Structure formats: C-alpha cells, structure tokens
Amino acid sequence: MTDPIAAAGAGLLADALDAQAVEVTRVDWQPPMDGTAADLATVATDPRRRDANARAARAMLDVQAMLVDVAPASEVLGLERGEFLHAGPPIDWERTAGPMRGALMGAAALEGLVDDPEDAAALFASGTSVSLTPCHHRSAVGPMAGVVSPSMWMFVLEDPSTGRRTYCSLNEGLGKVLRYGAYSPEVLDRLRWMSAVLGPLLASAVRAGDPVDVTGILTQMLQMGDEAHNRNRAGTLMLMRDLAPAMVESDATAGDIGAALRFIGGNDHFFLNLAMPACKLALDAARGIDGSTMVVAMARNGTDFGIQTAGTGDEWFTGPAQIADGLYLGDYGPDDANPDIGDSAITETAGIGGFSMATAPAIVRFVGGTVPDALATTRRMGEITLTENPRWTIPVLDFRGAPTGIDVSRVCRTGILPQINTGMAGRVAGVGQVGAGLVNPPAEIFPAALASLARRVREAA
C-alpha cells in the first residue's frame, strides 16, 4: 500500500503507474508563460496585491445597473458633428479593418457628412473635420464595430449608490447591420427609423416608470439559458415585459408601437446592448486600484485586441486580434471573416458570455461547440478568476457563481486564456455578419500587462 502519487506534464509516468495498479492523480499543469517568471515573482510578493484584488472584486460585485434613460448620443455623450466613437483600443483610419471602415462610412452618411457612404473613405483618410475615439474612453461600449455617431440613441445605465453612468447604442439585429460593417440603403433606413421612432418611444417608456433593474434581469436570464453575450432571448423578453405597458400607454401611434414591439420581439440580441453597459458599469468601479491585477476591460477594434487592468490606469496592452473558430452563414467561410472585433468581450470580463457557457447549452450549436465543452469552459475559467459572482449563479453547476474577475497573474501562471463567444463580421466593408464562434485574446498581451504591473511594484518599493 502506497500513498497516492500526483503526476503532471507528459503522461508517461502516470501511464506506467496505472499499469502497475498504483493510485495516481493526474494534474493538469504547465509552466508559466515564457518570460514571466521574474514578473510573476515580483507581483506575487507585492504586499498590496491581496487587499487590492479583494477591493476590486468587491467594488465590481457591489454595483447595481439600472436603466434610467434613453437619449441621443449628442445629448448624453456630448458628441458633435464629425465625432465618432468606435469599439476597442485606439486606432486611426489607416489601420482600420473592413467592418470598422464600413460602419464609419455608413455613420458618416447617416449624419449627412456625405451623400454616398463610398465618399466617406476620402473624408476619413483626410483626417479633417472628423475624429475617432474609443467608446471606452467616453464611458460607453459598442458591439462589433461599435460605431456611435451624434444622432444615434443610447441606453443610459446608472449605479444608484454612486451615480456613475455608462452608455450603449440600441441593437439593430443580425445580418446586414452597421455594427457588422454593412451600410446599404436598408441599413441606413433602419437606423433613421430607430432614431425617429424606436429611441423616442423607449425613452418615453423608461421615463414613465421606475428604472429597469438590468442587473436583476441578468441574474434571472442566466438561470433561463442565456449567457448574455450570444444568447439574450430571455433577457430581451423580460425587458419587453417591463417596457411594453408604458409603450402602449404612450402618445405614439398604434402603428409605431406595433412596429417597435415587433422589432424588439424579433431580435433576440436586443438585450445585449444593456448587458454590455451593465458589465462596464460594474468593472469601471474597480478601476484605479493600485496593486490590483484584475482585468477591467477586454476590447477589439478588428485589428488590435486590447486589455486594461485595475492597477495600470488607462494604459492599453494590445496584440493582433484573432480569427474566431465557429460556424459560418450561407456560403461564407474562414477567408471571408475579419479578425475579432467589438467591445462585447466586456461580458466575459465580468464573468458572463463565454465564462458562463455552462448555463446556456442551447448556445453551443450557434458558436460551434458542444455541451461538455461548455461545462469544461466555465470550470476552466474559474482557474484564472479571483472570485465567483453570487448574483449570477449557474444551475447546472449546482448554482455556483459565475467565474468573475480575470487575474492577469493567473493567466500568465497557468497559460489559460479567457474564452470569448463572438459574432464574426465580414472582412470586406459592407458585407455584414458572416458567422459566430469562439475566440481567445492574443496571449502576449497578458505578459505585457504583468510587466507593467511588476514595474509599478518595483517603483513603489
């Protein structure tokens, strides 16, 4: 009789012990990411780290996101003619990918800067009278291209305990839509209807009643089969349940009310544009905590993938965005897809989306996975996070909380990368959506963030 033996790495030793009927526990272990050993040691010995990460996680979990208004970006964000927001870290026109270019060209036509979207390319190339700013720099988030222009209406979310606010545009649906880089006449006509009818109608409904508890809806939808990134069906229906009575009782025409309810009810992704700012509102509460290694933003602009951490201010750590692995619409294939794009990875940063795949088995076919993959993914994400979210529980895992608070040092130590559910935009401007799938951030951005954290520890010593 011998004590159990633990075996890591290649399975030769474990296999040999098995063959000799010796009890062996196989440990899934791999060395830290290349070049991170010294920085990991520095960060691990930082006396501030444990308390800083506890404060960051607590600040994030204490936030309650309430929908308090719907209004044009020109009013709530102060956007002026020629100002555009976009998804991901900062980028200039020369480096923008096809879907980002298509969305900007369509938005320029929507704002009347050009008559034909094709003419907008020269406008942006000139760099005169237009500007590009990341959504994250203006307390906003945007799915896919994430382009916001002054006339677009925005959801306004507020944490009642602090008064902080975040913003997101209204969801257009799937397929040929601006956020996937499409700018055909029907895309622009839909956006004009959203600004003329849908936005004002939603605003009147929200202002007529109590604020809508978005965090509470997220709690319920995670127990109803939504992971709140690529599947928002339950959340969309619960939002419509809350707003529909006030919409019907408004002064709008029956035709406009019917069109708005059909649009929301026919778009299972409508709630995504509330889930995203709710997650940003929570994560922004953790910003600016010296010594914390927690990730507070993951975002992509179709060219670069960037992260920010609680302990490194507004600094972005970027690498090349990756092509998602998944399923394609119609005849589209991998050659048609643009690299990963959008601010929607803010959901994974907060612990839902790919991190809560286990709660949404129905989503796995949409993104090309399996149910066992979904369960394993959520468990694996628990190895790189600081805590679990007691509000967002997962029934199939015996109501364990969603893995929450990505820790840069754990990512570097284990080599496990965050898992993201995502849509896929066409590589060519104007095409729109070509599929959906799974993607990871570029690995090198986590050692880069760790190096910055370690440098700050050494400077503080």
Image (tube, rainbow, N blue to C red):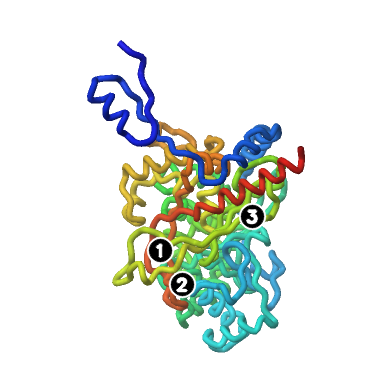
Tag 2 residue: 177
Q: Amino acid at mark 3?
A: Val
Quadrant for the N terminus, please: top left
How far apart marks 1 and 2 lie (CA) works out to 15 Å
Choose between 169 and 135: the one closer to the eye: 135
Measured from the top left, where is residue 341 in percent x and y? Answer: 50, 63
Measured from the top left, where is residue 356 in percent x and y? Answer: 44, 44
Q: Which quadrant would residue 71 be assigned to in this image?
A: bottom right
From this viewpoint, is residue 16 visible? yes
How far apart marks 3 and 2 lie (CA) works out to 26 Å
**Which one is in front in this view, the residue at disc 3 or the one at disc 2?**
2
Of pointers 3 and 1, the one earlier in the residue sequence:
3
Q: Amino acid at mark 1?
A: Gly
| Label 2 CA crowd tier, 10 Å (few <14, some 14–19, many 20+) | many
Tag 1 residue: 266
| Label 3 CA crowd tier, 10 Å (few <14, some 14–19, many 20+) | many
Residue 14 placement, left or right of 301: left
Secondary structure state at the residue bearing disc 2: loop
Of pointers 1 and 2, the one earlier in the residue sequence:
2
Secondary structure state at the residue bearing disc 1: loop
Residue 159 placement, left or right of 224: right
